[in-house]
Image: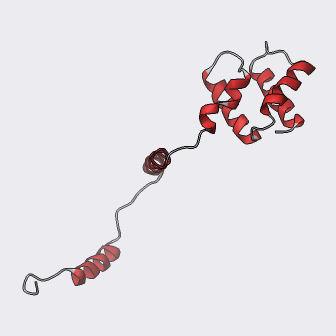
């Protein structure tokens, strides 16, 4: 993260938490700790903090070391499954599903009847 991004992040904090004081020393200190953190990650962490806290974040709240740790394959799969379920739920809430047209049903039945094994052939 560069100085401009650090200043932008601090401006967001000041907007969300008016009591937060920004001085040149504050900007330098925050930049010292945030310069290795990707700006997008810091923005996400700040957004999460603003959503759940009534108090201005500390540097550690924006860095969020727990998010920097690599995730296991199982954690990634669990998150992917959760996202899939949310997408499915959203689909069911927003889409207006309609019954299958008769001609499509007939074509499917004809196709599947060709795939069935007759009891005499087994």
Q: Residue at x 44, y 54 (%)?
A: 96
As drawn, is 52 to the left or to the right of 9? Answer: left
Residue 121, how many percent across, how many down? Answer: 10, 87
Residue 82, how many percent across, how many down? Answer: 45, 45
Q: Nearer the viewer, residue 77 or 120?
A: 77
Give the number of callouts.
0
Q: Residue at x 44, y 51 (%)?
A: 88
Q: Residue at x 78, y 38 (%)?
A: 36
* Residue furthest left in the image: 120
Q: Residue at x 83, y 32 (%)?
A: 6
Instruction: State the image quarter where residue 101 is shown.
Output: bottom left
Residue 55 vs 66, above or below: the answer is above
- Image quarter where the N terminus lies is top right
Residue 74 vs 52, above or below: the answer is below
* Residue furthest bottom in the image: 121
Residue 59, how many percent across, how many down? Answer: 73, 24
Residue 50, how many percent across, how many down? Answer: 67, 25
- Image quarter where the C terminus lies is bottom left
As drawn, is 9 to the left or to the right of 96? Answer: right
Instruction: State the image quarter where residue 70 is shown.
Output: top right
* Residue furthest top in the image: 19
Q: Nearer the viewer, residue 118 or 64?
A: 64
Instruction: State the image quarter where residue 107 is shown.
Output: bottom left
Residue 118 vs 37, above or below: the answer is below
For the rendered model, the colour scheme is: secondary structure
């Amino acid at each position: 993260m560069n100085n401009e991004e650090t200043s932008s992040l601090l401006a967001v904090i000041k907007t969300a938490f008016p009591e937060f004081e920004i001085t040149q020393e504050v900007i330098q200190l925050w930049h010292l700790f945030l310069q290795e953190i990707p700006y997008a990650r810091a923005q996400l962490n700040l957004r999460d903090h603003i959503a759940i806290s009534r108090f201005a974040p500390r540097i550690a709240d924006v860095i969020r070391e727990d998010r920097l740790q690599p995730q296991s394959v199982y954690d990634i799969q669990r998150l992917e499954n959760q996202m899939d379920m949310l997408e499915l739920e959203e689909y069911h809430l927003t889409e207006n599903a309609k019954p299958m047209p008769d001609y499509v049903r007939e074509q499917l039945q004809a196709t599947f009847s060709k795939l069935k094994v007759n009891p005499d052939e087994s």
